[in-house]
Image: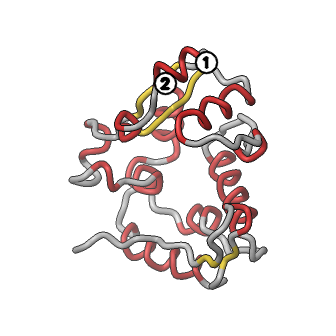
Amino acid sequence: TAPKYLNMPIQGVKAFKELKISDMNFAKKHRDVLSVNYKHSPFFDECILEHLVCDPKTEWFMDYFCKHIMRMMYLFDITTNLELASDANSQSAKSFRLDEIITHFKGDVYLSGIGGKNYLWTDYIKDNSGADVIWHDTDNDKFNNIHDDASMLMILDTLFEQGVDEIKSILND
């Protein structure tokens, strides 16, 4: 069967922080799709699903998104502060913007998906902010048993197929 995408119904075309949720029932729809697809997975848990894909208490996408990320951080014992790139007040574009954000937050490492190799100027970032760019490649044996195309994976695949402890292990590697 074709993959099912979990689309977020939003309205607005300006800045990320100005987007609004246009259908407040999306979370139930997402939970229903995930339940159907993962109910036979070894680590499927309705309580975790309800915790991670909760009903929005706000119409603002940014508020919902940040709360969602914080729930994930709590579940996986991530204690790093959540910072918004917009707080860096960068007006630049592409790798220049990324360099300014890394510098603003005094970062020394930037973790990028493998696709970033096609466009990130790693030498520029290293020379200016001093940060190393690390490529995270999901196309490895840990994930191939979940999905034929590892690029289609999301963290919920690993959560329900391999469990919370496996995600914590991956994050600590």
Choose top left, top right, bottom left or bottom right for residue 160: bottom left
Residue at 51% of width from left, 21% of height from top? 124
Q: Position of residue 40 (x, y in %)?
A: 35, 67
The residue tagged 1 is 128
Which residue is at a point 58% across and 80% down the rendered structure image?
26
Kind of residue indicated by mark 1: Asn
| Distance of label 1 from label 2 (alpha carbons) | 13 Å
Asked whether, in this view, residue 124 is left or right of residue 162, the answer is right
Q: Which mark is residue 41?
A: none
Q: Secondary structure at mark 2?
A: strand
User: Residue 108, located in which quarter of the rendered image?
Assistant: top right
Q: Which residue occupies the foreground of this view, 48 or 133?
A: 133
Quickly name the residue at label 2: 133
Identify the residue at image location x=51%, y=75%. 30
Query: SS of the residue at dot 1?
Result: helix
Marks 2 and 1: in contact by CB < 8 Å? no
Give me the residue at 40% from left, 37% from top: 119
In the displayed structure image, the side of residue 7 where residue 58 appears, left or right: right
Q: Amino acid at mark 2?
A: Val
Q: Residues within 10 Å of mark 2 (few under 14, many from 20)?
A: some
Q: Is residue 35 left or right of residue 1?
A: right
Quadrant position of residue 25: bottom right
